[in-house]
Image (spheres, rainbow, N blue to C red):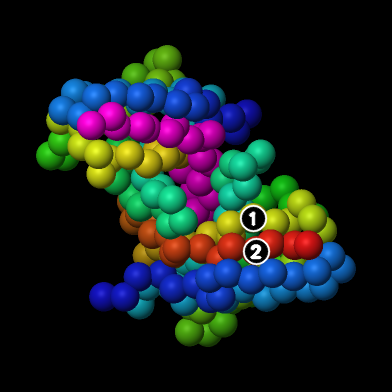
C-alpha cells in the first residue's frame, strides 16, 4: 500500500510569508504527527492529531499550527516565516488509537524541504 | 528530561560489524526505536524494542537494551556500503510524541 505522502517536496518562501504543508497518511492510519528537522536542533516534535483533534504539542511558537481532516489527511501551517524556520518538515502516521502505547509503529514520509530567504 | 544522546559519527570497514550507541533519560518510555535516514529522504523504521525486553534480533540487526543504565545499542552485522546513513534512536512518550537522538552518521569504507 502507499506510504505517507507529503507535498510539496521542496519550496522556497520569503521571510514574513506563510506556508502550508500537506500530509496524506497511510490508508487506515488515523494518527498523524509532524516533526521539524534542522542541522542545529535535530528532530523535534511539533504536534500530533488523531480524529481531527490535537492530542499533543511540542515546544514551538503559535506561528506553527496544524489541523486534520475527516479523511485523516493533515496540514501544517507556519505563519510569518523566519529564516530559522528553514528545515525539513516530516509527517508521520500510525495506527495508534486511543491507547497511549498500542505497539503500532510510526511511518514517516519523505518530508517537505522548506527554505526561507 | 527528554534528551537522547548519540555519538555523532562512526566509520567502519565493509564486512565488519557496526555498533551504534544511544543513551536516554526517561525510563518510563515503553518503546525505543531505531530509524535510518539516507540523504534527502525521510526516516525509515529499522526496528524497535519493547522496554521489557533485553535484546531483539532481526536478520543483520541486533538491538540491546540496558534499562538500568538507560542504554540502547544497534549492532549491524556484516556492514555494507548501503548501510551508510544517519541512524537515529528514539524513545516513545505516547500519543505519538517521539524524542529523537542527535543521530549517528555511519560511514562504511569499501
SS at badge 2: strand
Please, which residue is most extreme toward the left here? B59
Q: Residue at x 67, y 75 (%)?
A: A20
Residue B90 belongs to the span the image colors magenta: no
**From where the camera sits, is residue A80 visible?**
no
Left or right: A14, with B91 as reference point = right
The residue closer to the viewer here, B72 or B109, is: B109
Q: Could you tell me which chain the residue with mark 2 belongs to? A: A
| Residue B93, image x, y percentages | 51, 43
Q: Residue at x 39, y 25 (%)?
A: B10
Please, which residue is most extreme toward the top here? B69
In the rendering, which numbered label is found on residue A87? 1
Left or right: B7, with B74 as reference point = right
Label 2: which residue? A114
**From where the camera sits, is residue A17 visible?**
yes
Left or right: A2, with A22 as reference point = left
Amino acid at each position: 500500500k502507499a506510504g505517507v505522502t507529503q507535498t510539496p517536496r521542496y519550496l522556497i518562501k520569503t521571510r514574513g510569508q506563510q506556508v502550508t504543508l500537506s500530509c496524506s497518511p497511510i490508508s487506515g492510519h488515523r494518527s498523524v504527527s509532524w516533526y521539524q528537522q534542522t542541522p542545529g536542533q535535530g528532530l523535534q516534535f511539533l504536534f500530533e492529531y488523531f480524529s481531527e483533534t490535537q492530542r499533543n504539542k511540542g515546544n514551538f511558537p503559535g506561528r506553527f499550527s496544524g489541523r486534520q481532516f475527516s479523511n485523516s489527511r493533515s496540514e501544517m501551517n507556519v505563519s510569518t516565516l523566519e529564516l530559522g524556520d528553514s528545515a525539513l518538515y516530516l509527517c508521520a502516521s500510525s495506527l495508534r488509537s486511543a491507547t497511549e502505547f498500542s505497539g503500532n509503529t510510526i511511518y514517516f514520509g519523505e518530508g517537505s524541504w522548506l527554505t526561507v530567504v | 528530561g527528554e534528551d537522547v544522546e548519540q555519538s555523532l559519527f562512526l566509520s567502519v570497514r565493509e564486512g565488519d560489524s557496526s555498533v551504534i550507541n544511544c543513551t536516554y533519560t526517561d525510563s518510563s518510555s515503553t518503546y525505543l526505536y531505531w530509524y535510518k535516514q539516507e540523504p534527502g529522504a525521510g526516516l525509515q523504521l529499522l526496528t524497535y524494542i519493547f522496554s521489557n525486553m533485553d535484546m531483539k534480533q532481526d536478520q543483520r540487526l541486533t538491538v540491546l537494551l540496558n534499562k538500568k543504565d538507560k542504554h540502547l545499542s544497534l549492532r549491524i552485522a556484516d556492514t555494507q556500503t548501503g548501510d551508510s546513513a544517519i541512524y537515529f534512536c528514539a524513545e516513545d512518550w505516547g500519543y505519538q510524541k517521539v524524542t529523537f537522538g542527535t543521530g549517528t552518521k555511519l560511514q562504511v569504507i569499501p
